[in-house]
Image (cartoon, helix red, strand yellow):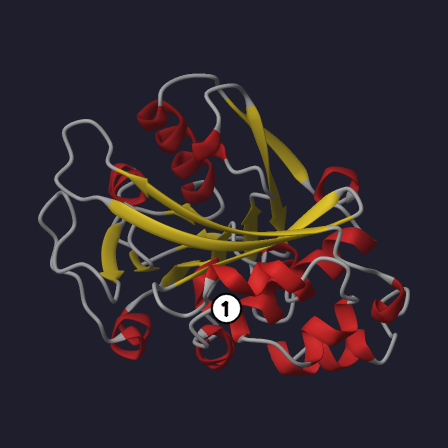
Amino acid sequence: MTSVATLAASVLAGERGPAPADLSVISAFWLHHTTRLPGADVTYRNYYVLLRVGEVFGACSFEPGELDPAYCEEASGLSLDQLIGDAPLPVRIAALDAYLAAVEPHHVAPDAEEIVLPAGTPDVRARARDAAVAGLLDVRPGAKVALIGVVNPLVDAITERGGSCLPCDFNLARTASGLPVSRDMTAVVDAADAVVATGMTLSNGSFDVLLNSCREQSKPLAVYAQTGSAVVRAFLGSGVTALSAEPFPFSQFSSRPTSLYRYHSQDGDVRP
């Protein structure tokens, strides 16, 4: 698989399971969520579109202003081929995610390692989640790890393993620990030994660029994904080294134990 567009074309052609015209959205919703962890001075603002198909949800996070909540009014009942082929980008990603998750839900995938996040406060659960993400790569002391999409507990998890974190984000100037945050993804990836990226690279159109860059430079790419987790899974072994897939309902919406699912395609050892 070479790109998100080729994956979507393969789905629409019926090459990856049942015809998407035969699967319909049961419910659609738009969600605006904010979080500020105790002691932090950063408020995370997240926007999601979610599409339910059968027992699964397709999810895509997006930037403010990209999608009006009114879109959801007419989405329920539409077939997935309509949305995968002709909809705003966040909806196309959510629909593609819903299709691929419906074909093979994460909780029954034979290659998935289930990680149960503990009950607790948001900061406890966030640190457990980000430790699980950091564990996707065996980071050796001194290794430089590009972090595309800054989550402060994940910065800490990388540095606690002896890695040097190279953060990149469009919405932050510095991490909570004071590291400068670059806006130049290409420069950060070029300087790194390995890359950890958010699934939001799907919704801002940078996933294909990142994927090709890591392929060309033979650099491990681990993705942590609430957005498009089943979409990213399709690229395991084709540029994606490892994946932390967190299907909806996401960990931040509950204080009780929830699961994420880790996948590995090859050795994730990262050396400087």
Quarter of the image where the N terminus is located: bottom right
Q: Is residue 241 above or below residue 124?
A: below
Q: Residue at x 77, y 42 (%)?
A: 55
Locate residue 96, reporting x and y percent.
Answer: 68, 66
State how many labels appear: 1
Residue 126 figure quarter: top left
Q: Amino acid at mark 1?
A: Leu
Q: Is residue 177 above or below residue 65?
A: above
Closest to the observer: 95 or 157? Answer: 95
Report the residue marked by disc 1: 202
Residue 247 figure quarter: top right
Q: Is residue 233 above or below residue 9?
A: above
Question: Tag 1, which secondary structure?
Answer: loop
Q: Residue at x 28, y 46 (%)?
A: 44
Residue 2 figure quarter: bottom right
Locate residue 259, reporting x and y percent.
Answer: 59, 31
